[in-house]
Amino acid sequence: MAAPVRSVLPVVLLGCGGVGRHLLRHIVSCRPLHANQGVAIRVLGVADSSSLLVADDLHSNGFDDALLADLCAAKSAGSPLSSLLSRGQCQLFNNTEARRKVIDTASVLGKTTGLVLVDCSATYDTVGMLKDAVDCGCCVVLANKKPLTCAYEDFEKLVSNFRRIRFESTVGAGLPVIASVTRIIASGDPVSRIVGSLSGTLGYVMSELEDGKKFSEVVKTAKSLGYTEPDPRDDLSGMDVARKALILARLLGQQISMENINVESLYPSELGPDAMSTKDFLESGLVQLDKSIEERVKAASLKGNVLRYVCKIESTGCQVGLEELPKNSALGRLRGSDNVVEIYSRCYESAPLVIQGAGAGNDTTAAGVLADILDLQDLFHKTA
């Protein structure tokens, strides 16, 4: 028998790509678990890059589970949200109308039941909506890193009420990296240094190189396993790691921007997207990197070290790139696509706090987002 409902969390989701769809599936599959905990999540709206599907009645139970399942199936098949209008329960808003409706919804529910605006998109375009939602007293949950890595003023605005924002899944998918850092800081223990391997793709690539494999072959294998973006240069540029590093650095109080981070790309500009297509890069560009990477791997091995692609955040600055590390260190022992983060502070000076686990994947990231939503439940109105 389900427990009495104590917390009702109305949700509007921005982005129904891989992570967004997995989140909706998690919400549906966890209904019995949440019912036993006295929690109800009501999905009132879902937006993609061009439109917003929203419930007819914002104070209703939201979309039923059958509609959510059909929505996930439709988006997986490449169909537009408009294909679901015949189901009833909902209205469709396009482009600028969609943005205005999100803000209107935030304004109405922010003053009554409350709202969780969840950003699982991959764009900077949501920043304005998120800031408006914060002004309306709504909660914000992010898997999208970009709103936290644009202008520092935007970051400051979004985290101004820390009780109402969660962004664990922006760094390390579902790993408790953000929570660990904030708890250490809150205890009065200053964090002096963070070192991490925060790319499942590059973690896999670097560990496979230890077996003597060629860089080009490993990258192609990683692509075939689905570890890389469609254009592997999106991973090899290091920019995704740099965004995660920037979020952590700002969390430590550093008022810096992407321009302040030294990022080492694993390919030169002459092999970049402006110079050649993805197809040409995979067929003829990658192999040009084999010799230089092999030399660095051998040089590290002669010293008893291994190469890892890491971010280093210290008071003196933030760096992202290849590092030689001892084989027996937490980062040196890393294999496969796991993430590892070492946090150094006064209490963790000689032996850092080490967090390791799956740090990528739509399923893992979505689970982290759902946990963030549930972490906000005490802020919402209780029902009898």
Image (cartoon, helix red, strand yellow):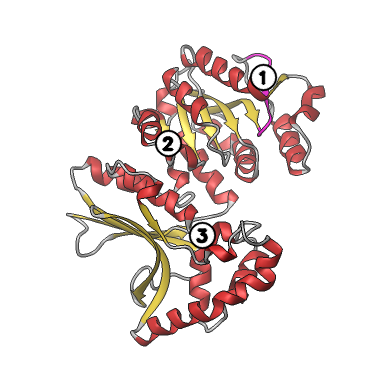
**Is disc 1 placed on a helix, strand or loop?**
strand
Q: In the rendered structure, which disc, 1 or 3, sits on the residue that comes first in sequence? A: 1
**Left or right, residue 272 beside residue 139:** right
Q: Distance between the residues labelled 1 and 2?
A: 25 Å
* Kind of residue at disc 3: Ser
- Asked if residue 49 is among those painted magenta in the image, a careful observer would answer yes
Disc 2 marks which residue?
166
Give the label, 1 or 3, closer to the camera. Answer: 3
**Residue at 49% across, 41% down:** 146
Mark 2 closeness class: few <14, some 14–19, many ≥20 residues within 10 Å: many
Q: Quadrant of the N terminus?
A: top right
Q: How far apart are marks 1 and 3 (CA)?
A: 41 Å
Image coords of residue 212 (percent x, y):
53, 84
Disc 3 marks which residue?
237
Where, by quadrant of the figure, is residue 88 drawn?
Answer: top right
Q: Do the residues labelled 3 and 2 touch (CB within 8 Å)?
A: no
Q: Do the residues labelled 1 and 2 touch (CB within 8 Å)?
A: no
Image coords of residue 237 (percent x, y):
51, 59
Disc 1 marks which residue?
55
Q: What's the magenta region? A: 48-57
Q: Residue 341, can we see it?
A: no
* Kind of residue at disc 1: Ala
